[in-house]
Each structure stands twice: as structure tokens, then as C-alpha cells.
Amino acid sequence: MHSSTLTPEQSTNFADFPRQFARSRRFSLGVPRHFTVSPDGRRVLFVRTVSGTDPVGRLWQYEDGAERLLADPALLVGAGSGAVPEEERLRRERARERSVGVVSYATDDAARLVAFALSGALWAVRTDGGTPFSVPAAGPVVDPRPSPDGRYVAYVSRRCFHVVDLTGDDRQLARAEGPEISYGLAEYAAAESMQRSRGYWWAPDSRRVLVAKVDTSPVERRYISDPADPTKPPQAIRYPAAGTANAEVTLEIRALEGDRVEVEWDRKAYEYVVAAGWDAHGPFVTVQSRDQRIVRTLAVDPETGATEVLHERTDPAWVEITEGTPARTASGALVLPEDEGDTRYLTVGGQRVTPEGLQLCAVLGVEGERVLFTASDDPLETHVWCHEPGHGLRRLSREPGRFTGAARGGTVVLAGLTPRGNEAGVLRGAGAAGAAGAAGAAGAAGDPPYQTLTSLAEEPLITPRPVHLTLGERKLRGALYLPSWHEEGAGKLPVLLDPYGGPGMQLVGRARGWFTCVSQWFAEQGFAVLVVDGRGTPNRGPAWEKTIHGDQLGPALEDQVDALRAAAAHCGDLDLTRVAIRGWSFGGFLAAAAVLYHPEIFHAAVAGAPPTDMRMYDTHWKERYLGHPEEQPENYERTSLIGHGHLLSRPLLLVHGLADDNVAAAHTLRFSAELLAAGKPHSVLPLPGATHLPADDAVNAQLLYFQRDFLMGALAEGTGKD
């Protein structure tokens, strides 16, 4: 680093950034999130911590331009004194939850009663005044949800399903018949890979509940131990690895009076329960075949449990799951995605309501005939849109960024990443006909009023300076980060590729996220940092996503190589004799593959939590892209790194949390053993007690320093030349 060109303040900021990054939990603390809008649109509920370093979530209400604290765990007698139930810990791990306290909540239909759990205790608060109160429960509480009429709260305790009224009169509606049975919880594959985090749904009349029953006894058992503390017994988990048995999921309708009706469908042909719900037209469920090429939406008869096919989607590769679908409007029109060519459309009642090129991302909600959704007509941005008969299609978020939202009663909450970071605000009158207001800025004349919700997040010590590029013949979207102190033409910079590069995540956009700050920090250490979203990443259409069908490695790695060469042609200061790559999860897999297969291009790599053997990853996620391993073993052989360790000829650092239940530490340990047997030097950094998302602040800070030093040392020692 050319420290002589930096001010003392800049030098301090660059040095302190990793610690700030860690203590702020990736700048997530202090950010408003989890929004609920009342039916009249006057009130907005949300969760937020009280500072950018405080990890304790509180429940807030915004009304008439003012925020009011509804529940603070620190002020509740006995709150936080117990242990978080294991089922809740696992739910938070699947959601990558980084805070404590009030991390989630649910309301009745009027948004007047709010229920939440604190360390296994059930709490509730009324939004029209008063203090939070505890509700007696039969045991440690997971996922409490009030009935639509606000008279009851349903919850799961010790895998059994309960309903309690606010006086503590508790009814156990479903009792777990054994240690492998649970009611009301999402199984691993649903929570990790299907975007379904819940396992029960109230009927609108508050007298019945649609409940998922999960039997994990067929699922492969794994054990996670703590090598740093050999006195701790190992933890047994059920993990459905590719090609092995899934959990058996059934659905039942349970009445408060005790009646039970089982939902009927061909579970052998359609073993995945992707989504479910219960609206004014009755209960419904979406099921998917094991090969994921057929998805059916079924109407359920609540009296008999019989089902009728409402809609069927098919695809020769796989049917992509779109969050928030299916849904139904007040008239009963089905709200669904439809893929054709390069566009994922939104359809309402079988009619396309979005134009070609506008990629549907998620459905956020339906009110009357109005549908709120997110979509992208530019890979660098995601916006909130509204469709309503008679008013057509309108974009509600205006300025650049990646937005999501919630809406009701003519009020829309817009939240997401903008060029200034995390922002959220309330847009009044957006449900009526008229122009949409601006998100995060003053609206144009005639726009509905927009009011910002306060973010208490820390301001990053580093300001990202991305140069957005469109690279190569495939028009890959990339961002190049150069040191703030670097002058063009003053000298060559070593290059660091910093991708994710896989399904489900984009890193390149017109927004400031934690990942853009980290990329800039590495740039300030003396790298030219290149981030590229290649084939398989979302929001560029079905054809783009499905290019990786059968091969998750080849296209992804090819795109990184092509983008590097195109970026070097754009910027002459990139030194292609010194190129490193780093990544986590799929990005870690991509980093390790880069030095295995292209040592002539990549000269060092850091691979964090890399899935090196695709057969060890979960059924729903991996079979989606590679098929069943018994039917298409060549796809797993081609994509896995296991079996190819003998190719390593460059410095490689493997990092893995030893408590990771998503990408098991065995991925790294087996690959390391293979490298050792082949006589290939490499480094391994184990993280005791860390899961797929390490939670320890000191570990997260030091990981950035450690990676920097490893990469700089590796490039300096080898000079990048053979």
C-alpha cells in the first residue's frame, strides 16, 4: 500500500474497518426490517436494534410520523433468561439471523396483537397501548403466530403443535409421536433451499390450522462435534444429502375442537411441499416432483382433505421457485410466475401482466386485486412494482438500488440497499391511482408523501468506489474496485477476484452493501478487485439461470476468466501475472476450482466453506442443478473438486467452520486429505464452533486480515510467474 498518499484518518479507517465490519454484524444492526402494515395503512411494525453495534432486536411501531417502542427485551422481567430452543436455533441458522432479542414476530389480521418469543418464552403486546405481557405456554416456544381474530396464539413446543388463548388456556392440537416427528416446523430442505421457513397456516375463521407433519426418520444422520472441546457430546442432525431420502412431509387440517383431516395428494410423485396457505378461497398447497421438473398448485377441500389441481408448471431442466407464489387475489385469480425464453413473467388469472424483459423476482403480497412484487429490468437493480386492474403496472421504488417492501391500506414500505446503504421508508397513498413516490429521496411534484424510517446502522469507515463494467460477449455485469490512492498509469496492481458467482445471489449492483465495502477494503490494501455475476446468478432470466444445468462449475469459472481478461483490456493497470481469488460457500468452491483448473491465470486462492463434493450437499438444492447422482453421476464428477486435488499447483487456503451444518466441514477435511496424499502443499484454517455464517466478532474481523496477509504473501513469494 502506498501509505504516503493516505491521510492519517484514511489509514486509521482502512486499518479499523474489519473490526467495524464484525461488530456491526456486516452493518445489519440498527437497520429497520421485518415490516408489517396495518389494514388501514396507518401503522407500520418493524424490528430494529437501538444502535449499529447493539445485537438486541426490539419491536417498533411507526404511526403518524413518529416511532414508538413496543417491546424491549431488556425491560421485560425474565426475558432472555432461558436458553433458545434447539428448533429456534436451527430456524435462525437457516435464516442466517445475526441478532438476538426480538428477531421475528407475527400479528393478527388487524395488526393489533403481536406475538414473539424470547429465549423460549411466549410474549405478546397490543399495538394500541399497554406493555408487553407474557402468555403461559406448555414449554419452550418456537414460531408463535396469532390467529387472524387475535383470540389465540399458535406455537410449536418440543415438536408438538399448540394453541393457547391469552389467559393461558392451552390446547395441544398435535402431539409428536416420536423423536423424529414434528408438527408445525419446516424441514431442513424447505428452510434452506425452498424459501419456506414456516410449517403451519391459520384459516381465516381462526378455527382451524393447516399444519405440516415432518418425519425425519428416513433421512441420513450426521454428527457435528466440537473438536476444541472433546468433553461435549456430538450433535446429531438429519441431513438429506443428494441422492438420499428426504423427510416425509404430510399436511393436516387441525380444528381447535380436536378434529383432524389429512390432506391427500400423490406424495410419491410429489414429495416436496414448496408452499402452502389458507385464504378466503380455502387452503392450498404447492407440491413438486423429486426431479423438480413439475410443480402443481392444489386446492384443498378443508372438510375432506381432497385436492384438485389448479395449475401445473413444467420445465425440462427445473421449475424455479418464486418466493411469495402462489397467491390469490380477492376474486380468486391465481398469482404465479411463468417462464418463457429469457423472461420470467408475472401472471394473474393466467394473463401476463409484466412485459418482456422485466424479470419477476418475488411476490410481496396481494390486497384485493392489487399485487405487489419485485422485478428487475436491469441486472444491477431490483425494484418494487404494483399491478392493479384499471391502473396497470407501476414502479414504486425510483432511485437506483435493490428494494423489497410490504403494503396494505394504500401504504407501501420500501426497504433495501441504495447507493447510500440500507434505507427504508413509508410511501403513503401509493396504493391509489397516481404516480409513485421516490424511495430514499424527495419525490417529484405530485408524488405521494414519503417518510424515512430511521436507520441506526453504523456508517462504514470505507466508501466503495465501484466502476461498473459490462464485460465480454455475454455482457457479464462486473464491478472493479481500485484503491482510492491509486493514480491511473502509476503502476500495475495485483488483481483479486471476489465473486459469489452462483445461484440465488447477486453481488454486482447500484447499491452499497457489506460485500461492496469488503471489496473496497481489499482494494485499499493494494489490489484491483473484480466482482462478476456470471451465468446461473439470478434476475437475468430463465435461460441465463439454466445455462448451468448439469454443470455448475464450467460456465461459472469460464465467466470469471473471460471477465478478468475483458477487465484487463479496459484497465491497463491490472497485473495479470499476479491474480488471486477469494470466496465463501459457492464463491469458495469457485475460488478453489480456479487454482485447480487454471493455474496459468490464478496464482493464489482463499476458499471459505467450499462444497468440494456435490454428493454431500442437500437433495433439493443440488439435484435441481445436477440431477440425481445415481442417474447422472457424470454431473457430480464434473462439478466436484474431490478427485481432482492432484491438479493443485498454486497456494490455497481452505477456511471452514467446524459446526457448519449446511456445508459440512467434511468437505474441506476430505479435500485437504486428498491434497496431502497427492503431495500438494496447502493451508487449512479451522474455525471451532463456527457455523456456515461465523458469528464471533473477533473471528470475523481477523478473517479479513488473515486472508489479506495470505494472499499478499502468496503473490509476493511466487511473483505470479512459473
Image: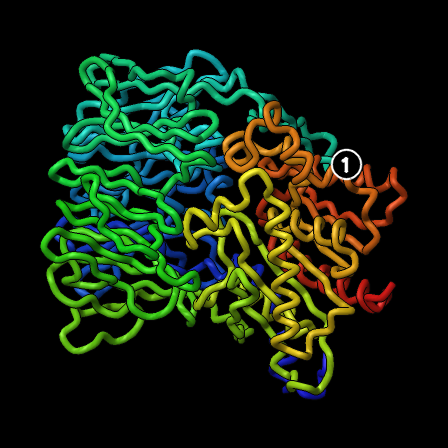
In the visual, does 459 lie left or right of 102? Answer: right
Q: Give residue 12's position: percent from left, percent from top.
A: 64, 77
Q: Residue at x 18, y 35 (%)?
A: 148
Q: Which of 263/694 is in front?
A: 263
Q: Give residue 641's position: percent from left, percent from top.
A: 71, 41
Q: Give residue 13's position: percent from left, percent from top.
A: 60, 76
Q: Mark 1 points at which residue?
A: 643
- Picture layout, residue 503 above or below residue 573: above
Quadrant of the rendered structure where residue 50 is?
bottom left
| Residue 15 visible within the image | no
| Residue 103 visible within the image | yes
In the visual, does 246 lie left or right of 719? Answer: left
In the visual, does 444 lie left or right of 29? Answer: left
In the image, farthest residue toward the right: 679
- Picture layout, residue 641 above or below residue 605: above
Q: How many numbered marks have been drawn onto this rendered protein structure?
A: 1
Q: Give residue 196's position: percent from left, percent from top.
A: 39, 36
- At label 1, counting other C-alpha atoms closer than 10 Å, the crowd grade (few under 14, some 14-19, many 20 or more) is some
Q: Of helix, strand and loop, which one carries label 1?
A: loop
Identify the image quadrant of the C terminus.
Answer: bottom right
Q: Which of 569/118 is in front?
A: 569
- Picture layout, residue 417 above or below residue 278: below
- Picture layout, residue 618 above or below residue 527: above
Say which amino acid is labelled 1: Gly
Q: Residue at x 39, y 28 (%)?
A: 288
Q: Which residue is drawn at 13% across and 39% down?
A: 330
Identify the image quadrant of the N terminus.
Answer: bottom right
Q: Residue at x 21, y 37 (%)?
A: 334
